[in-house]
Image (cartoon, helix red, strand yellow):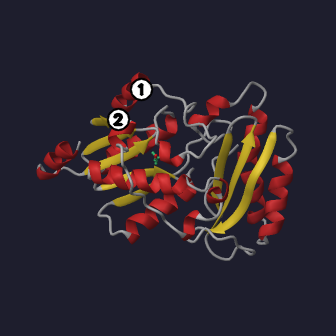
Amino acid sequence: MQARSESLRLAGKRIVFVPTMGYLHEGHLNLMREGRKIGDSLVVSIFVNPTQFGPGEDYEKYPRDFKRDEELASQVGADIVFYPTVDEMYPANYQTYVTVEGVTLNLCGQSRPIHFRGVATVCAKLFNIVKPHAAVFGKKDFQQLVTIRRMVADLNMDLEIHGMDTTREPDGLAMSSRNVYLKDGEREAALSLSRGLKIAQGLYDSGEREAAVIIEAVKNHISSYDTNIIDYVKICDTETLEDIDQIERESVIALAVKVGLPRLIDNYVFGEPLAIP
Ligand code: PAF
């Protein structure tokens, strides 16, 4: 992969990279379509990264379908699909990890303490292997995007990071590979995440700026479904990801909820449009 990238660079090509863990859905494909627009050579990686899953999480069960993924990626114009093995990425005696501090502490960092170390490490490695000029990430994983931007700035990595809006199902559910875990009858409960964001938007648009008031309304809606166990509903500064009491600068409402089996996340940056019916 490094040799391929080096020759693309020597030929003057702009390499755009979309890292994924596979089981591609329309959200991933939109990242790739964006990638196609902003570069000459589109590289997509498919690697279910063990270091970002904690003990008891769904690493083994994470859905995988490489053949289908490869086909879908080629259909939207991927030039190279890079799919390393775990032994290639983490050979025996592997010892180096990237830890991004402040922005990984809140939100998902509280219930998934090693997650962002795994994400930052694998992305640093993939950036060194693929040598992209730009990489595209989805805003659905808002904390991941902030973490990657922080790492790239702090470690002087020579690439641009593009953030893309969340792709949603027509009913508003944010697309996620983990949606396949939802059982019949859990759809309405899962929709409480996006509908909760809609409630937050409505309150904000009508002038509410008190974070606790908005959080309470969203929590009430989500917890009205028996299957739902709220991990967090928080309002944070979009740059530091620290909790805020009053919405005065650019802020995001982020939520994580266990809906039956899957733990789903979603978020909304106040003041932005929201494609939820
Ligand atoms: O968002 C994902 O699918 C993963 O966290 C990523 C960025 C591919 C790193 O494994």
Q: Quadrant of the N terminus?
A: top left
Q: In the image shown, does 95 or 185 lie closer to the viewer?
A: 95
Using residue 110 as the reference point, say whether residue 195 is left or right of it: right
Using residue 46 as the reference point, say whether residue 64 is left or right of it: right
Q: Residue at x 68, y 42 (%)?
A: 263
Q: Residue at x 33, y 43 (%)?
A: 36
* Residue 106 seen in the current view: yes
Q: Is residue 164 above or below residue 46?
A: below
Instruction: Give the Cα separation between the discs numbered 1 and 2.
Output: 9 Å
Q: Which numbered tag is attached to residue 29?
A: none
Q: Residues within 10 Å of mark 2 (few under 14, many from 20)?
A: some
Q: Which numbered tag is attached to residue 66?
A: 1
Amino acid at circle 1: Phe
| Percent of width and height locating residue 24 | 48, 33
Could you say whether the residue bearing mark 2 is in a helix, strand or loop?
loop
Asked if labels 2 and 1 touch by Cβ distance under 8 angstroms, the answer is yes
> Of label 1 and label 2, which has the lower sequence position?
1
| Percent of width and height locating residue 132 | 28, 52
Q: Is residue 19 above or below residue 110?
A: above
Using residue 7 as the reference point, say whether residue 134 is left or right of it: right
| Percent of width and height locating residue 157 | 32, 64
Answer yes or no: disc 2 within 8 Å of ligand 1: no
Quadrant of the image occupied by residue 73: top left
| Percent of width and height locating residue 202 | 76, 58
Q: Quadrant of the C terminus?
A: top right
Q: Is residue 261 above or below residue 54?
A: above
Amino acid at circle 2: Tyr
Q: Residue at x 64, y 64 (%)?
A: 106
* Residue 172 seen in the current view: no
Answer yes or no: disc 1 within 8 Å of ligand 1: no
Kindly identify which residue carries mark 2: 83
Q: In the image shown, does 170 or 212 lie closer to the viewer?
A: 212
